[in-house]
Image: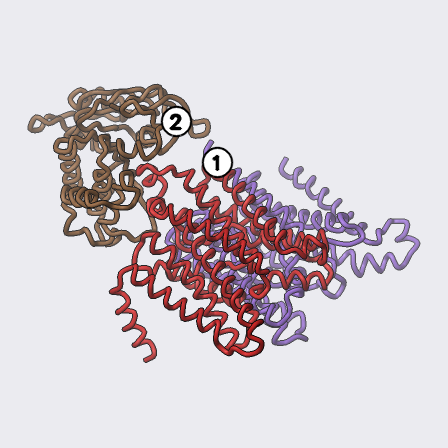
Amino acid sequence: MLFAPLARAGQFVATFTPLKRLVCFAAVLGLLAMLFMTVKLTGNMNYVLPRRGWMLATMLLVGIAAGVATVLFQTISNNRILTPAVMGFEALFVLIQTSVIFFMGADSSFYSSPLIRFVCESLIMTGFAVLLYRWLFAANTDLHRLLLVGLVFGILFTSLSNLMQRMLMPTEFDVLQGRLFARLTLPHPQLIMISALVVLVVCIIVWRMRYAFDVLALGRDAATGLGLNYRKTVTRILLLIAVLVSVSTALIGPLTFLGFMAAILAYQLAGSYQHRFVLPAAAILGVCFLAGGQLILEHVLSMAGALTVVIEFIGGSLFLLLLLKRGRL
Amino acid sequence: MRFLAFLLALVLVSLLTVSSLVVGSNSIGIMQLLADPAAWDLLILSRIPRTVALLLCGMAMSVCGLIMQMLTQNRYVEPATAGAVQSAGLGILIITILWPAAPVLARMGFASFFSLLGTGLFLLILQRLSLRATLIVPLVGIMLGAVISAVTVFIAVRFDLLQSLAAWTSGDFSGVMKGRYELLWLVGALTLLTYFVADRFAVAGMGREFAVNLGLNYRRVMLLGMSIVAIVSGVVVVVIGALPFLGLIVPNIVSLILGDNVRRNIPWIALLGGGIVVACDLTGRLLVHPFEIPAGSILGVIGAVVFLFVILREQIYVRS
Amino acid sequence: MIEVSQLNKFYGNKQVIKDVSFTLSAGGITSIIGPNGAGKSTLLSLISRLLPADSGSVRVDGMNVATTPGPQLAKRLSVLRQENHFVSRLTVKDLVSFGRYPYSQGRLTVEDHEKVNAAMAFLDLQVLQHRFLDQLSGGQRQRAFVAMVLCQETDYVLLDEPLNNLDMQHSVAMMKQIRRAADELQRTVVLVIHDINFAAAYSDRILAMKNGQLIFDGSPQTIMTPQVLEQVFNLPVQIEQINGQPVAVYYR
């Protein structure tokens, strides 16, 4: 009963061109953003409005970064189920956070300056990614091996973090936990602005390469045959992915499955295989998930702090369902 | 020759075992044992149970790795890369929330039950996989484990149990004392059972068609293997916590040296597995003396490095 | 002209291409034959810079394939491998349009669209142009891929086992279309092919490989002798002349 109008709407949307669909997504996003800014607006406007504004900005950046990074990662890895998180990024983030508290204590001056921390974290993560892939790609490693190596690196980082966490004071552990989960309300405005600049630059580069992605999706041999410098392009894309994931994890912490959900839905709804439609769709949908999820959690379920964990939960279940249904990676 | 080698290895592990009995925040010497009754108490209440637990867990988890590798026909699978260990963790978390005062036996049963579900889910997914390339199977298993962990962490955060969760799942032997480890003898018995039915697992490891052709009841062997793995994982996680990569690296190292005769390999795997865990625990006790690092954490780091080495080495091997 | 000189390739310690040199002048069809593991596909990959050579060089119209920029080479030489898997769900027209990428970098001009349509017409794909690749039969899909490389408008077209998984009817149709591409569009085609009789019936020149070496090079008539084929394939082969066409018989 409930699904009948939805299905009819779906059939109607199915006749849309890819461009029209993008406009629709953007409209939905606009609506969600408006709701997010205005629902249950009480208290001191000078405090509440900017706070919500910064939160929205954070969601915008994280959603875009997750969506774009995941689609690009899936294009170069030629599958539609794995995500950059698989390569051990989140685990590295946790390791860096844990090391900082472990070696410098919860209240060192290094730790209290969000800007320095952000720059350091991003640099370490990007550096790591570039080194790892340079090394692995230099060995002409096949993709499954690459992914498995990434996964095992992730486990290695997790083990190291666990090792250190075991030796933390409970108060320090609390601080760490606060940094690792539900950090949506925390980022510093300065940090958000720098992230915005970084994301903007990355997006411009990505947009200029949009047709190359379509060719890359044909696979290594076909892309080379069409004149693409495969290695150079893939290395460049890995670098872009590393920057995007770094920004997103540094802003709100580990999120394994947000990009996965955004990308899956983008492939289904964008109405085209071309990256110039899929990429913006994934970015917008990523933001929609964050804003919509926060709206529901905050005002319907009153669980304001649990957004990232809920997204992990839903995304993870979706991942398993899809794996069961499709039977391949 | 092989017998001699085994004897030598046995002596080495025995030496490790004796060191494990002696070393700790209070070291025990023979002189003290003769003079000080408190040293005897320490030995009987804490050191002996701890060392026995180390050996039993190491043996059982390594042999479990072998069973999983037979059942999935894949070298890179072990209870932790198949969702079994993570599921057991979820089970403990849920019973802790529902029934905080649950007796150990109930916790163990619950953990084993969840572990069985997790392994079943993994095998179900494998069955659906159209492309069972060697490296895809562990990829799927680790992703499954990650999803189950995500669910576990979500629940733990909601109920403010995150640090307890980290403590449960970190493979820590420091809490092992007389009266709190005896369940592990069950795990030892299961390891022994595995030795006696080893040939069935070996046949099952050749694939379903092959096994059915030889008249094996394939389903029953699968179920037996899954149950052993689930019970072992459940008990070990309840008593100790996770011992990552053990079931992966030990059978692989043994088969690298000795080939793939399952029955002949099992004693070696058990011995090596026990030895590695004792060594890790000893290292953990000595590194930050008088504090301790959980053996599981050290194993995680060492195991990951060894695993990386195995994956990357094989690539060089294949190409040359 | 394709000039291959003293080409060597190793996989680990195993040498899969041993000191191969030859020259292909423009025009016609050249087939590379040989037993499994002879290095046929590797040679094709080396010529088309899909694999780097360990020593030696390949020059296409004087350009060294190892150093020439990819886009420039992609306008001279196109290559189709036998395995083509990807996750994008493409229509036939989408796929063929990729052939214009070296020229337009994805932004198709009116002229590009004409060329795409011409390539599809050449391979009788117009009625299928809006079908998705996964809705096609093996023969139709193979035709779509060949249309893509033809659409690339290169002088040299390299095809790795284009008859793989095709039945008799589709194999003959495919070979006829390749022959037409060589004759009507003046393309220089290099094939890796398993079926010696197809190679003999449609090629102008045959290169025979064994153990990574080029052991025979000549017209079909000179290759289609019992002595040569027996040496290449380690198998007694009879040659019958049927309607003036040499046919190898080796089945029993």
Instruction: Give the quarter of the figure containing the N terminus of chain A.
Output: bottom left
As drawn, is B217 to the left or to the right of B250?
A: left
Q: Amino acid at mark 2?
A: Ala
In the rendered image, which residue does mark 2 sit on? C53
Residue beneath the point at 10% across and 26% down: C241
Residue A128 vertical position relative to residue A178 in the rendered view, above or below: above
> What scheme was used to colour the molecule?
by chain
Dot 1: chain letter = A
Residue A143 vertical position relative to residue A287 in the rendered view, above or below: above
Q: Position of residue C216 (x, y in %)?
A: 25, 20
Q: Nearer the viewer, residue B181 or A280?
A: A280
Residue beneath the point at 21% across and 27% down: C30
Q: Position of residue B130 (x, y in %)?
A: 37, 53
- Crowding at label 2, few (<14), some or many (≥20) Cα neighbours within 10 Å? many
Colour that chain C carries in the picture:
brown
Q: Position of residue B192 (x, y in %)?
A: 61, 55
Residue beneath the point at 57% across and 49% down: A122
Q: Are marks 2 and 1 in contact (CB under 8 Å)?
A: no
Q: Quadrant of residue C23?
A: top left
Residue C199 vertical position relative to residue B216 in the rendered view, above or below: above
Residue C152 vertical position relative to residue A48 in the rendered view, above or below: above
- Tell me, yes or no, whether dots 2 and 1 are on the same chain: no
Q: Judging from the image, what secondary structure is the residue with disc 2 in?
A: loop
- Evaluate whether residue B224 shows in this view: no
Colour that chain A carries in the picture:
red
Colour that chain B carries in the picture:
purple
Q: Position of residue C57 (x, y in %)?
A: 35, 22
In the rendered image, which residue does mark 1 sit on? A138
Q: Amino acid at mark 1?
A: Ala
As drawn, is C241 to the left or to the right of A40?
A: left
